[in-house]
Amino acid sequence: MNSMTKRQALSAIGFVTLLCIGLSSCSANKATEPLGPNSVVLPSFDDAFLVLFPDYCKRVSEEYAVPPATESPKGTKTKGPKRAEKSDDLVTRLEILALQGVKPTVVIASPWVFGRAKNLTEQLVANIIVPYTGSEVEPLSNRATESDLAADARPPRIFTIGYDYATAYRTMGEKAGQLVQKAIRKGDVDAKCSIIFQENFLRGKQALEAFKAGFKERVGETNLTGSREPQTGLDSVPHLDVHRFGPDLQTVDIVGTLQGALSDSTAKGTKVVVCAIDDAALSIQAATSRLDGVAFMVDTTTWEQSEKVTNEIKTARFSFVLKGNDEGMCRATEKLVNSILKGKPLQDHTLVPVGY
């Protein structure tokens, strides 16, 4: 899949997700109701999500394949849940299943699928797991008006699973800070790091704040602040230039920003460039430019993990690479499903370590 298609997939998920996705208003640690042995788990992934995370989708879909037929209350066979697969709307699919006498105990829905769903109630599904997403989202109870739902209707409990970007980005910030501090101590008072940071449905501003904290800690308190004022998007951090973008790239120019950060007029003193963006080709191209004395770091968690891209990452020789963790996401999903089925107390948001 080329980089443009990759960006389109990310945009398709991220835009709808940031507008519509919601969390249950239930508090953390609340126990779920114990469930019977015939509980149904229904995966529901959109095409863009399948492209971004094929290994995760394949494993989860195989683990929780919906049976092709179900028994009606009278013991006669009926057409099973696969009829509902023809609809890309989660609520419609659940309503079709309800007509067949099937109520999934757990739905595992991609952010885009869940983001489009409205008026979800416990009458359709008791629990929803949304993998590969952040935790700062609008409460589900805010998404429907009183006229949309019956007076006694309750929303399902929503669980999210996301990467522990705070820990990973703090580590990357520390390593970038160490390189800049080394240059400062050698007398390069203008030594700096530039980070090009793009928010998306999975990676939020908390990651950038964690990077800044780790960087500031390693650079340390020094009088060698240089003659320039750092360009920052948030709070000022000496020796750090921050270029921050939202998830919608229609009105911004990441290419121009990255090229500008590496140009002769601004790259003086640059010791580290961090590409925290969804464009693999652009990041790799920047790193292979082999700027003298510049180390490149990169976040590949939302990149295509094909053999071609993996080889290009090796060729680029990044100093530090954040990697996706589909295996960790699968384990977290399976553990969460099992805990729901057993009625154990659960947190609403699960963090999965990022690889590096």
Image (cartoon, rainbow, N blue to C red):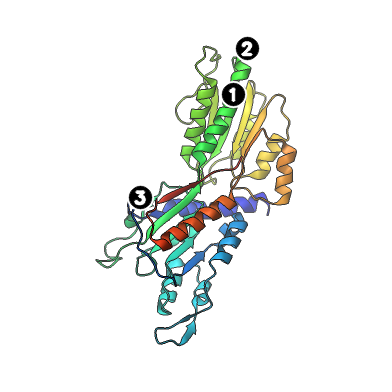
- Is residue 44 left or right of 4 when viewed as pictured? left
Say if mark 2 contacts mark 3, CB within 8 Å.
Answer: no
Numbered tag placed on residue 178 in the rendering: 1
* Neighbours of disc 3 within 10 Å: few (<14), some (14-19), many (20+): few
Q: Nearer the viewer, residue 111 or 214?
A: 214
- What residue appears at the point 48 percent right and 51 percent down from the top-left corner? 161
Residue on which disc 3 sits: 28
Rendered-image quadrant of the C terminus: top right
Q: Earlier in the sequence, mark 2 or mark 3?
A: 3
From what the image shows, is residue 176 above or below residue 72? above
Q: Quadrant of residue 97?
A: bottom left
Residue on which disc 2 sits: 187
Q: Earlier in the sequence, mark 1 or mark 2?
A: 1
Real-space Cα separation, disc 2 to disc 3, in angstroms? 51 Å
Label 1 sits on a secondary structure element that is: helix
Say if mark 1 contacts mark 3, CB within 8 Å.
Answer: no
Residue 50: % across, % down: 59, 59
